[in-house]
DNA sequence: CCTGGATGGATAGCGACACTCTCCAATGGC
DNA sequence: GCCATTGGAGAGTGTCGCTATCCATCCAGG
């Protein structure tokens, strides 16, 4: 266990905690007070840290994802089917955008966007609700201008998504597939956000000369 | 205050808490136990909730942003200059990607990307560090494939950023400008992430027919 | 063979965060 | 005149992600 800690930089008490929470499968016990940990454990631990540090997932959410990995009774397809929503809605999707004119408009705009994009049938996707909530907040604060940019954002998102799918294309291994979905999606968010910040900074420099 | 609570759906004790934390300026006192709250307070409260619910900012980070809004001694330019990094690095940027071959490669790749994009001079931007960290994690787990998609992501990010700048273009009001930067950047992240999920779902449907 | 230091397991504690509750004197409206 | 309501301040609550303490092993060096 000390070796595992040294290999990953994660303190021993934290490893014990992860074991308790089921984020990490127990090592093969060699004796009552000693267990063997292999490279799979090192890898898993790095996965957990990446999801927690950059993916913004809670320990409980990671446990949910990882439980399926350790359960040998599920196929790769089922794993992917479960992983995507788990990653898409890691926490409760905030307050439901209930009433109010802004919420109404937001719903309309989302419906219109889905239609324009040919994304019918995705109205019940959890991310559609998030989208509506965000839009409602923006409209409520009078940032109607985002509506004009919405299609540009959608375009950008679609471009990113097709890069995602291309990457996923040649992954066959079962454990890796889930890793790729989870990491690609979550770390991809952070990655895109970071890139957007950089692009903004660059453009702002040009525009405002400050 | 009851009216403020009714208008925004935020419970009264929470409003008191926000007042204590300086997220909300105090109302104009009419008597020792009564104060007047106007539409500006309603608006501010909605801003705070939007940043907290969808922007993922901590109360302390929001307080930092908002403090400048209430301070009349700063120009709009200074406000923007302060708002962008505050929004770009709301929390500590995770563990510094110190040693290891993966970290090394990540740094090289980021440098190469910045050069390709013509983003020299942004190497010290906090988001560049985040980018390096994310890449290091991905490489450490063997997801080298993302490197191929990196330019596509950058392209998408740049497209999103130019939509951002276009939106910001015709904002002159001082309080609004900060709102637009903060909301646009942070909620924009969530918005783009949601759109990407939808696009992924759509593409996955086509590809895997499941 | 014996002992000291590590191991694994379990339970309890800590600090941060975002509220939420309780109490209080001072109103304001009926 | 009186009683619910208000603003304000302090302490309390629940959750999260660890961290610290204990303890019965057990392996390795002398």
Image (cartoon, coloured by chain):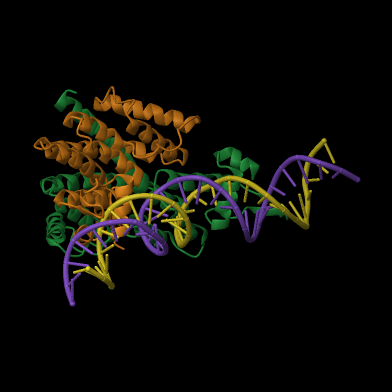
Chain colours: A orange, B green, C yellow, D purple
Residue A145 spot, x, y in % from top left: 37, 40
Q: Residue at x 48, y 48 (%)?
A: B48
Q: Is residue A127 left or right of residue B153?
A: right
Using the rendered view, name the quadrant where residue A181 is placed: top left
* Number of numbered discs on residues: 0
* Closer to the camera in the image, D9 or A68: A68
Question: Which residue is farthest left?
Answer: A170
Q: Is residue A85 above or below residue A21?
A: above
Residue A196 visible in the shown view: no
Residue B87 spot, x, y in % from top left: 36, 55
* Closer to the camera in the image, A13 or B18: A13
Q: Is residue D15 left or right of residue D30?
A: right
Residue B119 spot, x, y in % from top left: 18, 58
Q: Is residue A62 left or right of residue A41?
A: right
Q: Is residue D23 above or below residue A63?
A: below
Give the position of the C terminus of chain B as an image quadrant.
top left
Residue B30 visible in the shown view: yes
Residue B9 spot, x, y in % from top left: 55, 38
Q: Residue at x 66, y 49 (%)?
A: B36
Give the position of the N terminus of chain B as an image quadrant.
top right
């Amino acid at each position: 266990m000390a070796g595992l800690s040294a290999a990953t930089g994660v303190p021993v008490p934290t490893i014990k905690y992860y074991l308790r929470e089921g984020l990490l499968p127990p090592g093969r016990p060699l004796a009552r007070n000693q267990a063997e940990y292999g490279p799979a454990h090192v890898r898993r631990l790095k996965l957990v840290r990446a999801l927690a540090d950059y993916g913004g997932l809670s320990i409980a959410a990671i446990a949910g994802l990882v439980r399926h990995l350790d359960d040998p009774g599920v196929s790769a397809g089922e794993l992917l089917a479960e992983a995507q929503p788990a990653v898409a809605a890691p926490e409760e999707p905030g307050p439901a955008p209930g009433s109010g004119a802004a919420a109404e408009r937001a719903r309309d705009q989302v419906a219109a966007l889905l239609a324009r994009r040919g994304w019918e049938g995705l109205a019940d996707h959890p991310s559609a609700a998030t989208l509506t909530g965000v839009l409602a907040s923006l409209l409520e604060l009078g940032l109607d201008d985002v509506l004009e940019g919405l299609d540009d954002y959608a375009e950008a998102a679609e471009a990113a998504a097709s890069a995602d799918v291309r990457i996923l294309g040649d992954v066959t291994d079962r454990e890796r597939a889930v890793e790729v979905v989870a990491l690609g999606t979550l770390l991809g968010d952070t990655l895109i956000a970071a890139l957007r910040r950089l692009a903004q900074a660059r453009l702002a420099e040009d525009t405002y000369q400050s």
